[in-house]
Image (cartoon, grey):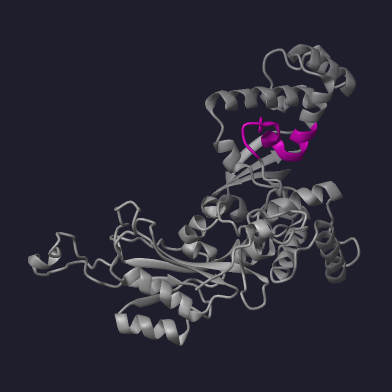
Amino acid sequence: MNENRRALLAVGTRLAYDGQWWQVSELDGAHVLLTSQAGSLRQVSAGHLLADPGTRLQGTPADLAEGAGADMAGLSEAELAELRERVAHVQEVRTGFRRGCAELAADGEPRPEYSPGVPMLTRYAAKAAEIGVGVSTLRRWVKDFEADGPAGLADDRWRRRSPLVGADPRWLEMVRLVLAEHTEASKPTQDLILAEVAARLDAEHGDGAVPVPAPTRARILLRQISKGTSAFGGTKAKREIAGRPATPYGRLRAMRPGEYLLLDTARLDVFAMDPVTLRWVQCELTAGMDLYDRCITGLRLTPGSTKAVDAAAVLFESVRPLPQPAAGQVGLPPPYHGLPGQVIIDVAKLADQDGEPLLPSVAAETIVVDHGKIYLSEHLMSACARLGISIQPGRVYQAATKGLWNTGSGPSASSCWLRCPATKARMSTGAARTPSSRRSTSWTN
C-alpha cells in the first residue's frame, strides 16, 4: 500500500486524510503541505501521511503541478509577510474568514460585506476598494490561489521563470530529438522543425494526444532549447558545438619560447600571376606562430595550393639561425624561439670576431597542426623526426585548437596585405573584377 501511495503522491493529488478531503499543494522534502476544500492549510510528514490507515489517495492529475518549495524558500521576510497578507485577503473574499475557516475565525468575522450570503461580485468590489487594487487583479489572485495555493500569489517578478515551464515534456523531448538528428544535415528552418515535431508526435501518440504550443509560443520554446547550439546558424559551427565533449577542454599553456609552435594555412585575398598561363591565381599563407609570445617565426606565401614542402620550409625558417637584417632595414631582428630549457655552451662562442651575437640552432619542442595532408605528410613528419620535434595534431572539427593563429591571420592581419598591389578586397555582391593592369604583380620564385 505504501509503495502505491508513494508512487502516486504528487502536487495536485487529492486524498482523504483525518476525516476530510485534501489536495497536495507542496512537497518539501519529507513534508507535505495539504489544502482542504475550504482553503485551510495543514503540513504533515510524508511518512506519517502514508502510514496512516485512514489515508486514501484518489489519484494523480494528468498535468502535475510544479513544486514551489524552492521559490517559497527564496522569499525574504518582507515578501513572506506580504504573501501572508495577500493570502488572508483572498481567503476572506472566498470564505469570509481571513484564515479560511470558521473554526479559526477572528473577532468580528465574518464582516458584513463578506458574509456567506453576499454575492461574489459584491465581495470583489468591496475588497478591491479596501486594498486599492482593481477587480480584475483580485479575480486573478483568487484564480491563482485556487490553482496553485499560496505559491500562486507570490510576487514572481523578481525571478525569471524558464520559458519552458508549462510546455508538454513529450513535445520538448521530441524537439530535442529532431534537432539532434539535424546536426549533420544542412541548416533547417524553424517551421520545418516544428512541422516535423508535430507529425512525429501524432504518429507516436495519436492525433492531438500531445498539446502543441501556438506558433509564436513554439518559436520561443524552440529558440530557448536551441540556444548555444547554432542549430539555425552556421552549419560548421553547429557540427563543431555538437562534437564537444561533456567536460571542458584543458588549455594549452606555454611556459617558455619554443615550447609550442602553431602551424596552419589560410587563403588570402592576394593574387599572383602565373608566368606560363598568364592567369591570376589566389595565394595561401602558411605561417608558424610561437604560442608563448605570439610571434610569427616563419611564413610562406604560396600561389594556388599549399604543398608539404611549403610547410617544411616554414618549419625550417622557424628553427634556423636568424639572418642579418638587410641593407637599409632596422637592425633589430625578432626574438629567436628555438630556445631549449637549458643551454650550456662555450662563452667564447656567444659572439663572433666582430662582436655580433651568435644564436644556437635549436628546434622547437612541439608543433601544433591540424589534420591537413600537408602537415601529416611524410615530408614534414620525417623532418620533425630528424630534428627531434614532437607533432601534436589538433582536435578534429575544433577551430579553437589554433585560435591564436586564426586570430592573427584574420581581420587583425588584413591590414598587412592591404598595401600589397595584388590584393583584392572582398566584395559582398560577388561581382569581383579581374585585377587591372595597375596591379599586374606577377609571382617570381
Q: Residue 317's quadrant in the figure?
A: bottom left
- Decide which of 55, 141 is in the foreground and name it: 141
From the viewer's perspective, tell me whether residue 413 is left or right of residue 56: left
Q: Can residue 230 be seen in this view?
A: no
- Decide which of 55, 355 is in the foreground and name it: 355
Q: Residue at x 65, y 56 (%)?
A: 438
Q: Is residue 36 magenta?
A: no
Check the image and report above or below for 148 versus 373.
above
Q: In which quarter of the image is the N terminus?
A: bottom right
Q: How many labels does the image show?
A: 0
Q: Position of residue 384 (x, y in %)?
A: 36, 80
| Magenta region | 143-160
Q: Residue 189's quadrant in the figure?
A: bottom right
Q: Where is residue 428 in the image (x, y as percent from the top left)?
A: 74, 53
Q: Where is residue 356 in the image (x, y as percent from the top left)?
A: 18, 60
Q: Is residue 150 magenta?
A: yes
Q: Position of residue 349 (x, y in %)?
A: 12, 68
From the viewer's perspective, tell me whether residue 306 is left or right of residue 58: left
Q: Which residue is drawn at 85% across and 16% down?
A: 125
Q: Residue at x 80, y 30 (%)?
A: 140
Check the image and report above or below for 352 versus 127.
below
